[in-house]
Amino acid sequence: MKTIKKYFGICTVALVLTLFNACTFLDVDDYFNETLKYDSIFHNKLNLEKYLWGTAASFDDEGGIFGNVVYTPGIMATDEAFSLGGAYNGLQLVLGEVTASNAQGINIYDKMYRIIRKTNTIFARMDEAVDLTSIDRREIMGYTHFMRAYAYYNLINLYGPVVILGDDVLDTNEDPEYYARYRSTYDECIEYICEEFDKAANYLPSEVAVNYFGRPTRGAALGMIARLRLQHASPLFNGGGKEGNAARFYFSEFKRSSDGEHYIRQQYDESRWAVAAQAAKRIIDWGIYRLHTVERTGDTRPLPPNVPDAKFPDGAGNIDAFHSYSDMFNGESLSPRNPEFLWARYSSQVKSFTQRSFPVTYFRGFNNLCITQKIVDTYYMEDGRTKEEAMSNGTYSETGYMNGTYSFSGYQLGPNVHNMYVNREMRFYASVAFNGTWWTATSTTEASYKNQQIFYDYSGAGGKSAVTDDVNSYPITGYILRKYVHPEDAWAGVGASVLDKPFPIIRYAEILLSYAEALNNLQTSYTLTDADGNEEVFTRDVQQIKYCFNQVRYRAGLPGLTDAELADPDAVQQLIERERLLEFMCENRRFYDVRRWGKYVDSENELMMGMNTDLSGDDYYTRVPLNHSKARRRVVNRKFVFMPLMISELRKTPTLDQNPGWEY
């Protein structure tokens, strides 16, 4: 009997230790070391602030969307981009190499719960600081609520519904049942996280000093609420939307094992669109944000006749559409004072990965951060027509070349640029390098390392035949991402330098398009109460949709919505989806957008296409499926909507349910 009791006791202790040490949300690395320091940490304001900002530093670089990523699969896990090069972790997901035993480096579960535990510790002990003023306390409360909300936000985006701990710090001496936590439903997670961001907004400043650029503000908190509310209203998380298909297709069997509750709502609730509209309108009405614009100059490209020439935001008459867009991303504009950034941070990842855009020959780049043909074909012509519409009346051609050269806004086009790339919209030229693109790299003083026209066809200086040391250093699609590259940036030659790059975590263009999308999905009117207790009515107001959507279009130098388009909600939704693809290209929105719309499988099932990089001259300009084993091995599986919970976590915490389709 003593032996049995002893064995039972050992097992009980082992179970407690396993639950405590192994559950990610109980992963308290350096717990005892921290405990010994707590008295000194929370004794005064200085140490408390060090602990606070040390916790904030645990978040990953949001600009890590290309490779070496850990917080997101990034752009390589979408239909936006593809590469043969290494260090692009997101490719591992679409190649089917991510498993519940090996996340291929894309695993933030552990890190986010550590952050949450630290924020809960701050809340529990911050009042011990003897020299903390009421103003200090408000600031710390704001940033701590924001960090806790942001940690959960990252978790639900990657894993879906998660365990909500509330204010629990989680002690070490509780019964096993104390650590047996269940995942909340997606609805419960959204409500909790939005509430946390809302609390943060009540404390955070409206702006921060230039030297504190990157710290979240009230606008950042409100912007994250707007993003989450739109996501919550979208088909994947809202009963499948009006058609009722998406949620059932992906989540019909995704239920909590403890009570059979669906983790993802299976019934449509249109009122969520009104809530999303209110969240976006709250920011618009605040009036402190606006789209980034640059004034028109003598070399600004003339507007097409169908684009209003009124002053922005009623037209594009006084702005340079190319610089208004490009200067946000390449480091030209003063990022800390950009009125479009609700929240942005300088990103070492974005800066370093611009080298992967540069050609190998002349520029010592990697030449393999590729944009897909789908993206190129989605960009509009300069007058707002699709390439198909322009082809039908002879103003777009996929044969022949531009005569001579043409320059605008400091950008040079030609010579020998194919007609496929002529007269395209300004965001195209700001974002994509194509066959015959002019690379400047003016920060170097060595003539041989700058001002070169680079061709990506087989025999070109940036093409497959020019590859020497690294066989993967050519653009397999025929296109390179140029969005974050400044004309001065150079990676080779005397004096070569690269400007610091901001990464926009959320910007005002998203708020405008979110408001338009939310209103467009309303079929009836909803009366909601705002933060001040006033009633607001939300309905499908076509004038509001038009005004918000058109601002984004005018900033790009394009015409706005027509009355015929506005009369059709389905047409407007399609235009909004297209606009988001182009406006936020390679800003890490696409991965989440196609999922929330319930269109992930459809978008990923399209063949990944590019130019024929195995040929030269006219033969190059043929759309072909990417000729490489990586491209052919791409896997489309609806389980990829969420990343898996690791098997090690599930085995040690049996109350956790696995995400649909992933192994236990």
Image (cartoon, helix red, strand yellow):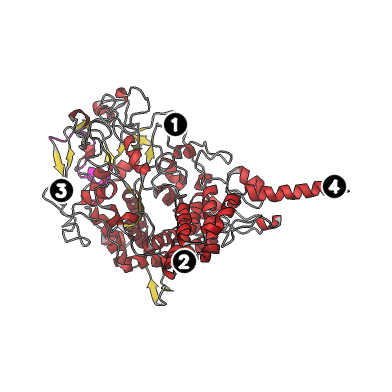
Of badges 4 and 2, the one in the foreground is 2
Q: Seen from this angle, which residue lies furthest bottom?
A: 534
Q: Amino acid at mark 1?
A: Lys
Q: Earlier in the sequence, mark 4 or mark 2?
A: 4
Prevailing secondary structure of the magenta residues: loop
Where does residue 264 sit, x and y in percent of width and height? 55, 57
Q: Amino acid at mark 4?
A: Ile
Residue that badge 3 annotates: 301
Image quadrant in which the C terminus is located: top right
Helix, strand or loop for disc 2: loop
Whether residue 394 is in magenta: the answer is: yes
Helix, strand or loop for disc 3: loop
- Determine the CA span between mark 2 and mark 1: 59 Å
Q: Earlier in the sequence, mark 4 or mark 3?
A: 4
Where does residue 177 sit, x and y in percent of width and height? 70, 57
Is 499 in front, or is 133? 133
- Determine the CA span between mark 4 and mark 1: 56 Å
Residue 240 visible in the shown view: no
Q: Earlier in the sequence, mark 2 or mark 3?
A: 2
Whether residue 241 is in magenta: the answer is: no
Helix, strand or loop for disc 1: helix
Q: Which residues are magenta?
A: 383-404
Residue that badge 2 annotates: 131
**Pointer 4 local density, CA inside 10 Å: few below 14, some 14–19, many at least 20:** few
Q: Amino acid at mark 3?
A: Arg
Q: Earlier in the sequence, mark 4 or mark 1?
A: 4
Residue that badge 1 annotates: 630
- Determine the CA span between mark 4 and mark 2: 55 Å
Residue that badge 4 annotates: 4
Q: In this rendering, is residue 205 above or below 630?
A: below
